[in-house]
Amino acid sequence: MKKFVMAGLAGTVAGIVATTQIAGPLLAQEAESKADVYQQLDLFGDIFERIRAQYVEEVETDDLIEAAIDGMLTSLDPHSSYLSPDDAEQMRVQTRGEFGGLGIEVTQEEGFVKVVSPIDETPADEAGIEAGDFITHVDGESILGLTLDSAVDLMRGPVGSEIVITIVREGEPEPFDVTIIRDTIKLTAVRARTEGTSVVLRVTTFNDQTYPNLKEGLEEQIEEAGGLENVNGVVLDLRNNPGGLLTQAIKVSDAFLDEGEIVSTRGRDPADGERFNATAGDLTGGKPIVVLINGGSASASEIVAGALQDHNRAIVVGTKSFGKGSVQTVMPLRGDGAMRLTTSRYYTPSGRSIQALGVSPDIIVEQPRPEPASDEDDEANANTRSEADLRGSLNNDSLSEDEIRQIEEDRAKAEATAELREQDYQLAYAIDILKGLSAFRPNGPSQ
């Protein structure tokens, strides 16, 4: 019995010795790491003092510190940054849906400002700015090497003032200038309309008003159609939508799902991960959905598209999305400023990370650039004739007036779709998909 106890004690002592032998070097490494950090902070202090004392011009201490903080954050990734008190207030205003500016969402790539997407019906959109454009100069001044916030500051200005930005666009041989008049940007988060028997929900941003606008707009269109039975499906148009609030992306996804995961976020610490699940209730009653995306669909837009795609709840049509799969947390700082820090990545229900890859459409449909109609096309259209145009042609007496009226209505719908195809090929394609799906549904509305 004594031997057993002694053996146990010996094991305990040996364990203590082994732990001490391992912990010693770890503690030394930690102490050395802290010493290195303090040395670097001392170096920062030395440089700060020398700039303040010896720089060729007098500089504001606050400006130096803010620049140092911003440089530290922007070195991490394109979406982390320091927000001065003015910038923090501007961000809060944008979230509420009204602000002054050009109407573009931008990021930084290879030192240049890249347009993520223009916002619908804003000065930038009306001036023809496109997703993927690179802005190289503002009023003739190069922005190469500037931080994103500094470049954005150059583009800000009083409402009604003029700005000239230089654009480099893929497919264009030379850079070109675009003149834009700054204006107050009032974001209508969702615009709802009906094309034929398809409800089109154009979602331009994810701010505080997105889900309420979407729900209200969808209900109005269903009521005008005379009930859900007269609607063949919904087109959720997320093209050129740069994203916004994660909470709104979850609500919009939940609007069309009855159950299952919508999105998950994972940070450095696994314990900080979150999962967001759908609740019962589908605003469309299970009607078919087509989601439209393109290279200007980013962030929250990709969450919605990825969630509906993974649950086989929607057919995703268009071109590959932007690929912003990271989540930024805005943290208030002393002095009314804020820090925007990338804290996690988000994943679709199937576990896909969209970061840098984007959402791939189920059906790839490019939006062709409009081409001016030639004189030959106009002449061909003018010479198109039918049997009914011939003098003395026989009437069709095999159909009733109601049947003839129905044929004419169907023809008018087809002509409207053809006209839409000229204006917006991707949207017309989405509506055609809904028509095809509706044709195989026993209780689908007439086309």
Image (cartoon, grey):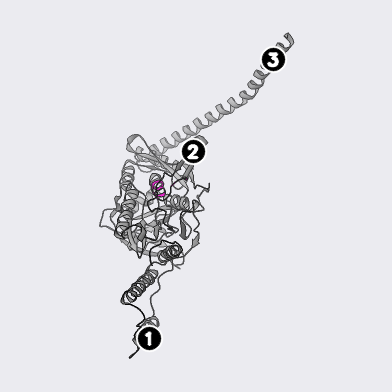
Q: Which of 215 and 283 is in front in this view?
A: 283
Across and down, in percent, residue 198 comes to: 37, 62
C-alpha gap between disc 2 and disc 1: 68 Å
Distance CA(mark 3)–CA(mark 2): 42 Å
- Mark toward the start of the polypeptide (3 vs 2): 3
| Residue 356 visible, this angle | yes
- How many residues crowd around disc 1 within 10 Å: few (fewer than 14), some, or many (20 or more)? few
Q: Are marks 2 and 1 in contact (CB under 8 Å)?
A: no
Question: Any magenta on residue 26?
Answer: no
Q: Earlier in the sequence, mark 3 or mark 1?
A: 3
Crowd rating for badge 3 (residues with CA inside 10 Å; few <14, some 14–19, many 20+): few
Whole-percent x, y for residue 149 in the image = 38, 48
- Identify the amino acid type marked 3: Gly
- Is 62 drawn above or below residue 181 in the view shown? above
Badge 1 marks a residue whose secondary structure is helix
Q: Position of residue 30 (x, y in %)?
A: 56, 28
Q: What stretch is highlighted in magenta?
A: 248-260
Query: Furthest residue to the right?
Result: 3
User: Which residue is at the front of the view, 307 or 147?
Assistant: 307
- What is the three-letter code of the residue carrying label 1? Glu
| The one of 221 and 292 positioned closer to us in this rendering | 221
Rounded to the nearest whole Å, what is the CA distance between mark 3 and mark 1? 107 Å
The residue indicated by pointer 2 is: 273
- In the picture of the structure, the residue carrying the numbered disc 1 is 387
> Eyeballing the image, is 432 above or below 21?
below
Residue at disc 2, secondary structure: loop
Q: Name the residue under label 3.
A: 8
- Could you tell me which residue is drawn at 33 percent across and 42 percent down? 88
